Amino acid sequence: MPTARQIDAAFRIARDRYEAVGVNAEKACAALAKIPISLHCWQGDDVGGFENQGGAVGGGLAVTGNYPGRARTPEELRSDLDAALAVIPGRHRLNLHAFYGEFGGRKVDRDQIEAAHFSNWIAWAKSRGVGLDFNPTCFSHPKAADGFTLSHADKGIRKFWIEHCRRSREIGAAMGKALGTPCVTNVWVPDGFKDTPADRLAPRERLAESLDAVFERPLSPKHNLDAVEPKLFGIGSESCTVGSSEFYLGYCITRKKLLCLDAGHYHPTESISDKISSVLVYLPEILLHVSRGVRWDSDHVVTLTDDLLAIAREIVACGDPSRVHIGLDYFDASINRIAAWAIGTRNMLRALLIALLEPPGIRKAEKDGDLTARLALQEEAKSLPFGAIWDHYCQDKGVPVGEAWLDDVRKYETSVTGRRT
Ligand code: RNT
Ligand code: ZN
């Protein structure tokens, strides 16, 4: 492990190197500290939730792997999140799903949930200085078993899910109010067809109508921001997804909602990086689900890929990162789950730091019409010493530098997660 002095020395050299290309590394670090990442609670327990219904994940989602140590209770999940946050620099957020409520052993159906069921989460978040985001859970439930919820042909089933989503955004608003930072409440429904539908229009009309009912009551944007999430396909809904990209883009523009761009929800050769600027022309704010699809929407742990770098670059290049709410969305049960959070979140931050350290000469070359210089500078920027800036940032924020974080996670594994059966 490098000593603090070595980290400082490397930082000073790197800072000078960046200064030579017109970048202020200290300013970049200060800007990074202002960007929160919303950690997805569902990485900690394989999208299980705490309803004690014993229901495996549904809705076309698949979690694979059997690594020991899954969180089985809200206390365990909070403790695991503390362990993850301890190795991630900066202040962040937690993204909760409705079925992570605490129901005191009683059966509380989804259309009965209340903010009181999340009071321990709110207290935890407050004590950690963490913001909360929220999601209705429209899967892993008997009323979603045939793959349809808000667009269901049965009015009673639609009503049930409308009530669930309505309550979810009220809970989101209660969280936002209690914590003094707006909660982004994101609606994703699995609705879709395994095989070629005869009528694609009616379910889409029903989905729009149901969503309008969900969002009927205005809530202060200081407390809650509504988002909706499109998808291309899921397991069991390969032929047609009711909430497609076009469906929700239109919905968001006409209803003034946040569009959620999930990195795994498009054709495999499409990246959400190019979509960010496109939708920011029409929408003041958007939500991202940063994920990594491998051949399909497999939700692998986020790694430092070209795709991730491009996403981070666009968030920064569009001028105001606060317009883009960044959430993570992956679930890997084949490795240590706390490590999965740490790896993905640290990578998201690292990608943002690289974006914040982009030499201004690249943009200038484009403005000047010098495409040769643009490409040359883009390529040279790839070997600038961002690692030394990142190490220093981690040290400055009081978290382990480099792979040292893994030792901390291993210690926690030996004493806590590894003992769970
Ligand atoms: C599913 C969506 C959705 C979920 C979470 C658990 O394809 O990406 O965001 O992953 O709500
Ligand atoms: Zn998602």
Image (cartoon, helix red, strand yellow):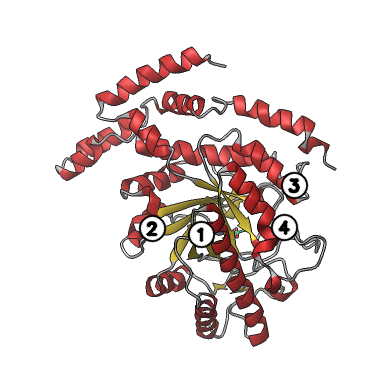
Q: Position of residue 90 (x, y in %)?
A: 50, 37
Q: Residues within 10 Å of mark 4 (few under 14, many from 20)?
A: many
| Disc with the residue nearer the chain's start (4 vs 2) | 4
Residue at mark 3 to residue at mark 1: CA–CA distance: 23 Å
* Quadrant of picture, ligand 1: bottom right
**Residue 385 vs residue 44: left or right?**
left
Residue beneath the point at 64% across and 63% down: 115
Q: Nearer the viewer, mark 4 or mark 3?
A: 3
Residue beneath the point at 66% across and 36% down: 83
Residue beneath the point at 57% across and 17% down: 1
Q: Which mark is residue 49?
A: 4
| Disc with the residue nearer the chain's start (4 vs 1) | 4
Q: From the Cβ of disc 3, is ligand 1 less than 8 Å away? A: no
Q: Position of residue 5 (x, y in %)?
A: 47, 12
Q: Quadrant of residue 128?
A: top right
Q: Which residue is mark 3?
A: 75
Tell me whether the residue at label 4 lies in contact with that at label 3, contact meaning CB atoms closer than 8 angstroms.
no
For badge 4, the amino acid type reads: Gly
Residue at mark 4 to residue at mark 2: CA–CA distance: 31 Å
| Disc with the residue nearer the chain's start (2 vs 3) | 3
For badge 3, the amino acid type reads: Glu
Residue beneath the point at 75% across and 33% down: 413
Q: Residues within 10 Å of mark 3 (few under 14, many from 20)?
A: few
Q: Which residue is mark 2?
A: 275
Q: Quadrant of the C terminus?
A: top right
Return the residue nearer the eye: 66 or 402: 402
Q: Secondary structure at mark 3?
A: helix
Q: Which residue is mark 1?
A: 184
**Residue 60 vs residue 287: left or right?**
right
For badge 1, the amino acid type reads: Val
Residue at mark 4 to residue at mark 3: CA–CA distance: 13 Å
9 w.r.t. 356: above or below: above
